[in-house]
Image (cartoon, coloured by chain):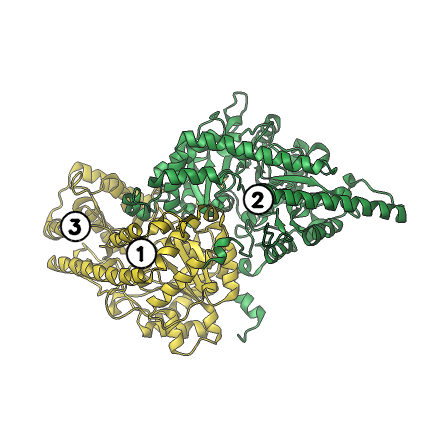
Chain colours: A yellow, B green
């Protein structure tokens, strides 16, 4: 009756990554109203710097009230549906993006395509670069939403580039080749490599060496690079963020063919903490891709109301400078607090310098070195300890025992509560197997859903 | 750059390199003419007047007044700023509950509260453009088809086919019975598909119609419901122009038909597409809605809506505005009144010179009959006439062939996207053209003594019109010309 796309589960929302949400939704933590509820640590949101945005709004009533020079621009905005986007908005976006890359790359507003969030940007790029059945290589672990964004409606395939903890999950030339060979064995034509830099879920920026490996690889195979740089503004510590564009320029590759096969995805959802506004974009030096993607953006344009507000805000260079600096400071502080809290509980993380989360090593808490054990531990953390975190298996990690935990989507007090729970209930209480009847039933539900994959989870997934 | 075109094409997808977006059509000549020479009452009084854009610009003052009086509806004002953080942070694809409630409420209001809508069945999309693509992804696999009565909105070719691989098959409608959708035509189209081994998954109707501006009567709606039930296929009703109906016959929504006792229908086959772009005049805010009576479709569409959610800033504003029932009632009534007045002025003005339009009760346009001005009853002659209208009469109108109209000589002319003064100028130009053309025709008749064939016998088949297969319209000009574009 319905299409195959509607009837299958390649939207990926039956995965464990989303099942944890349900438990959280049923019993969300609140400092006052529900202090024993589940704390949300599966949500890669940046809630640390809203006050800066709010004070800008208060100081700029005209822009906020959709006025220019005192005159209402409401009408023009309400009518503006041009898929080229508001020029003023694209101008400030490329300026901001260039600044975030240390002004080492020059970006043109005409190469920018606006989309409804990075979700739409990634899907649109896949529609442009791959036919149904063709493949893209992704290093593991990767953001679970990619299974939906890149594959669901496009019909494309993802072939993983296996990365391991032995070298901090870095991408190696042999891993790239292995992935390519595996795709070939399955008769899948590889059209490109997609990297997330800084990485979700690792929280690390890619080294120049890694970027060069990837560049060499795509030159050799004559394929594309999609670089999802959505977390580029959250690189709060050294080593500094290096964009794929910068790596190419350092090798003087601007006027070669590979320059036209590199496409960047960006968004304001993480850096500026505005996921609700659905501001995504594709930056490409390939005119054919820009042209096709622009037309496709008709299916998900950014509200002109939002384009206008943000074009005003981001054209205030003083504000953006201050915001970017302060935001990174706060993220660094928060991350250090989290890492030291985990350390005191005997838990380490992958050393990270970016992102809104840590990649936490809980292998030593596994009953056995298996994914079943990882799920058991995960259920315990959700139901007993009361934290919604993301198990590594949902990110397609090859090794069990790793978990992504977000730290920037809550107040400091809530984070302290979370760390206390980890120390007391998870680590110290690790020996205890007793659970209440309520928790038991919740766990049984999770297991059932995980095993049977029947749940179609009703919650907007996010990063 | 040193690489060949074929090399590049190999590296991109077929979707990206093909013409499925529909913009490589002669159709855009009109847009280009307008953009390079746009009319302005004082600065460019001889420029091209835009009459190809189905926008509702007649009632903004009412909305602006509301916005000024309700600063709390914006999250950016002093009154609304306390909501900023929560709104900016909210990315749940269910949408803000108050948004869904307000939209459901508004949809009911627009239908005179004869039916109510369940907020839990409301799914957001990137405009109606996104809604249609989303439904096509949910309901049909590549190669399967939707039936579509002609003439239809050109961009459906892109929205329903481009990235989905779904096909569109025309259902023949003709001017002799005012382009009514007949059971016979539906059966005919269905059978043709069967013979060609194409699986039909649904029927898509736009009611009120674009480009006709007419509404479907109760009997037709019931016969459509019977048809799709018998064939067990979906019915997608695009009701985007619902509140633009300004006179009798009034608008009847498919939702009302479902409530009728004697109508037997599997409700799971019924889906409505809606948007605020036409009724409210907010195309820039990208508020598209899919309303489905099918739970599985609601669930699937909701997940797909991730690719085109409505900005929460906009959701918040809309929620506030549309839950103000007093304002909504006043707006709907006044907007309809202004559309009626504008429509009357326009059509009466045209009739004075003997130019008729299809009788319509809604929409933001008229379906103008200019077959008398065709040199011959062919689509080539229609294109030739169209070029004259753009370059000499200086009006950008939309030729019927771009809507897959089976008969040449029809043009869609928009009347609600300009002020009164501009409309007068447009009318004057049409009058002058008609007059001059009549005189020229008399002269030509005397010279050639040519017989005039009836255009009734010339409905071209779908295949013969392959030249116009790709004549599709982006809902907005590829060439930006809004004042906001110039202000950087």
The picture places residue B221, in percent across and down from the top left corner, at 59, 29
The picture places residue A322, in percent across and down from the top left corner, at 27, 61
Res B202 → quadrant? top right
Q: Nearer the viewer, mark 3 or mark 2?
A: 2
The picture places residue B381, in percent across and down from the top left corner, at 76, 50
| Label of residue A81 in the image | none
The residue that disc 2 covers is: B418
Identity of the residue drawn at 35% across and 37% down = B97
**Of the residues under marks 1 and 3, which one precedes in the sequence?**
1
Q: Nearer the viewer, residue A384 or B448?
A: B448
Q: Nearer the viewer, residue B427 or A81?
A: B427
The residue that disc 3 covers is: A418
> What separation in Å lies between label 1 and label 3 (alpha carbons)?
24 Å
How many other residues sit within 10 Å of disc 3, few (<14), some (14-19) or many (≥20)?
A: many
Secondary element under disc 3, as helix, strand or loop, is helix
Same subunit, labels 3 and 2: the answer reads no
How many other residues sit within 10 Å of disc 2, few (<14), some (14-19) or many (≥20)?
A: some
| Chain of the residue displaying label 3 | A
Q: Which residue of the protein is positioned furthest toward the top in this rendering?
A: B261
Q: Which residue of the protein is positioned furthest toward the front in this rendering?
A: B42
The residue that disc 1 covers is: A272
In the depicted structure, whether residue B43 falls above or below residue A225: above
| Chain of the residue displaying label 2 | B
The picture places residue B12, in percent across and down from the top left corner, at 52, 63
Secondary element under disc 2, as helix, strand or loop, is loop
Pointer 1 and pointer 3: residues touching (CB < 8 Å)? Answer: no
| Chain of the residue displaying label 1 | A
Identity of the residue drawn at 22% across and 64% down = A350
């Amino acid at each position: 009756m319905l299409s195959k796309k509607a009837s299958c589960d390649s939207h990926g929302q039956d995965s464990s990554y989303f099942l944890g949400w349900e438990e959280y939704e049923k019993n969300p933590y609140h400092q006052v109203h529900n202090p024993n509820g589940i704390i949300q640590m599966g949500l890669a949101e940046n809630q640390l710097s809203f006050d800066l945005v709010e004070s800008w709004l208060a100081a700029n009533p005209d822009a906020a009230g959709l006025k220019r020079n005192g005159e209402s621009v409401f009408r023009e905005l309400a009518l503006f549906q041009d898929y080229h986007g508001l020029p003023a908005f694209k101008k400030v976006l490329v300026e901001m993006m260039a600044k975030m890359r240390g002004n080492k790359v020059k970006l043109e507003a005409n190469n920018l395509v606006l989309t409804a969030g990075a979700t739409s940007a990634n899907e649109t790029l896949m529609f442009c670069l791959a036919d149904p059945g063709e493949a893209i290589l992704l290093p593991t672990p990767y953001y679970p939403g990619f299974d939906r964004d890149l594959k669901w409606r496009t019909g494309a395939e993802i072939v993983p580039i296996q990365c391991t903890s032995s070298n901090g999950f870095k991408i190696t030339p042999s891993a790239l080749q292995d992935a390519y060979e595996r795709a070939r064995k399955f008769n899948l034509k590889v059209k490109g490599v997609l990297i997330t830099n800084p990485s979700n879920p690792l929280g690390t920026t890619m080294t120049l060496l890694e970027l060069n490996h990837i560049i060499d690889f795509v030159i050799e195979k004559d394929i594309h690079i999609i670089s999802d740089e959505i977390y580029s503004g959250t690189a709060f510590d050294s080593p500094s963020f290096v964009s794929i564009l910068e790596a190419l320029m350092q090798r003087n590759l601007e006027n070669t063919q590979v320059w036209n096969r590199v496409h960047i995805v960006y968004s304001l959802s993480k850096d500026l903490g505005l996921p609700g506004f659905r501001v995504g974009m594709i930056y490409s030096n390939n005119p054919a891709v820009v042209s096709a993607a622009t037309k496709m953006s008709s299916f998900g344009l950014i509200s002109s109301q939002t384009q206008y507000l943000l074009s005003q805000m981001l054209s205030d260079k003083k504000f953006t400078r201050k915001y970017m600096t302060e935001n990174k400071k706060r993220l660094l502080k928060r991350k250090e607090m989290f890492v030291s809290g985990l350390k005191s509980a005997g838990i380490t993380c992958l050393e990270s310098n970016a992102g809104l989360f840590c990649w936490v090593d809980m292998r030593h808490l596994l009953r056995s070195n298996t994914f079943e054990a990882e799920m058991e531990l995960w259920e315990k953390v959700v139901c007993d300890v009361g934290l919604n975190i993301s198990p590594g298996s949902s990110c397609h990690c090859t090794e069990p025992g790793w978990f992504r935990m977000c730290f920037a989507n809550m107040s400091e007090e809530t984070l302290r509560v979370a760390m206390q729970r980890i120390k007391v209930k998870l680590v110290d209480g690790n020996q205890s197997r007793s659970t209440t009847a309520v928790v038991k039933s919740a766990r049984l539900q999770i297991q059932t859903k995980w095993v049977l994959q029947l749940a179609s989870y009703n919650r907007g997934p996010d990063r | 750059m040193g690489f060949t075109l074929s090399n590049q094409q190999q590296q991109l997808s077929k979707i990206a390199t093909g013409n499925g977006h529909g913009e490589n059509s002669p159709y855009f000549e009109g847009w280009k003419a307008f953009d390079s020479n746009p009319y302005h009452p004082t600065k460019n009084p001889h420029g091209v007047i835009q009459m190809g854009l189905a926008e509702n610009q007649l009632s903004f003052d009412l909305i602006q007044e509301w916005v000024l009086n309700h600063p709390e509806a914006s999250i950016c004002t002093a009154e609304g700023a306390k909501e900023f953080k929560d709104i900016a942070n909210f990315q749940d694809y269910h949408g803000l509950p108050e948004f869904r409630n307000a939209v459901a409420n508004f949809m009911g209001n627009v239908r005179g509260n004869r039916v109510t809508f369940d907020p839990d069945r409301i799914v957001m999309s990137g405009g109606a453009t996104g809604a249609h693509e989303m439904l096509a992804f949910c309901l049909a696999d590549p190669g399967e088809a939707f039936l579509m009565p002609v003439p239809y909105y050109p961009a459906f070719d892109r929205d329903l086919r481009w990235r989905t691989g779904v096909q569109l098959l025309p259902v023949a409608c003709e001017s002799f019975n005012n382009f009514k959708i007949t059971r016979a035509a539906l059966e005919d189209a269905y059978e043709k598909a069967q013979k060609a081994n194409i699986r039909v998954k649904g029927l898509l109707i736009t009611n009120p119609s674009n480009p006709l501006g007419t509404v479907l009567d109760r009997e037709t709606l019931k016969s459509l419901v019977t048809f799709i039930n018998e064939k067990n296929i979906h019915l997608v009703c695009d009701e985007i122009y619902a509140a633009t109906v300004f006179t009798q016959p009034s608008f009847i929504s498919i939702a009302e038909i479902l409530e009728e006792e004697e109508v037997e229908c599997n409700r799971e086959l019924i889906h409505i597409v809606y948007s605020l772009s036409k009724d409210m005049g907010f195309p820039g805010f990208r508020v598209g809605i899919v309303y489905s009576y099918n739970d599985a479709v609601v669930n699937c569409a909701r997940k797909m809506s991730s690719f085109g959610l409505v900005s929460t800033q906009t959701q918040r504003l809309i929620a506030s505005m549309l839950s103000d029932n007093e304002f909504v009632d006043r707006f709907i009534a006044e907007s309809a009144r202004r559309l009626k007045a504008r429509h009357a002025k326009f059509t009466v003005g045209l009739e004075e010179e003997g130019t008729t339009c299809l009788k319509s009760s809604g929409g933001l346009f008229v379906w103008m009959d200019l077959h008398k001005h065709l040199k011959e009853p062919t689509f080539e002659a229609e294109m030739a006439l169209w070029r004259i209208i753009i370059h000499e009469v200086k009006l950008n109108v939309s030729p019927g062939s771009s809507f897959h109209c089976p008969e040449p000589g029809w043009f869609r002319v928009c009347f609600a996207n300009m002020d009164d003064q501009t409309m007068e100028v447009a009318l004057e130009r049409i009058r002058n053209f008609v007059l001059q053309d009549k005189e020229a025709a008399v002269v030509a008749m005397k010279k050639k003594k040519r017989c005039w064939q009836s255009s009734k016998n010339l409905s071209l088949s779908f295949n013969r019109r392959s030249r116009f297969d790709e004549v599709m319209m982006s809902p907005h000009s590829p060439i930006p010309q809004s004042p906001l574009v110039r202000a950087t």
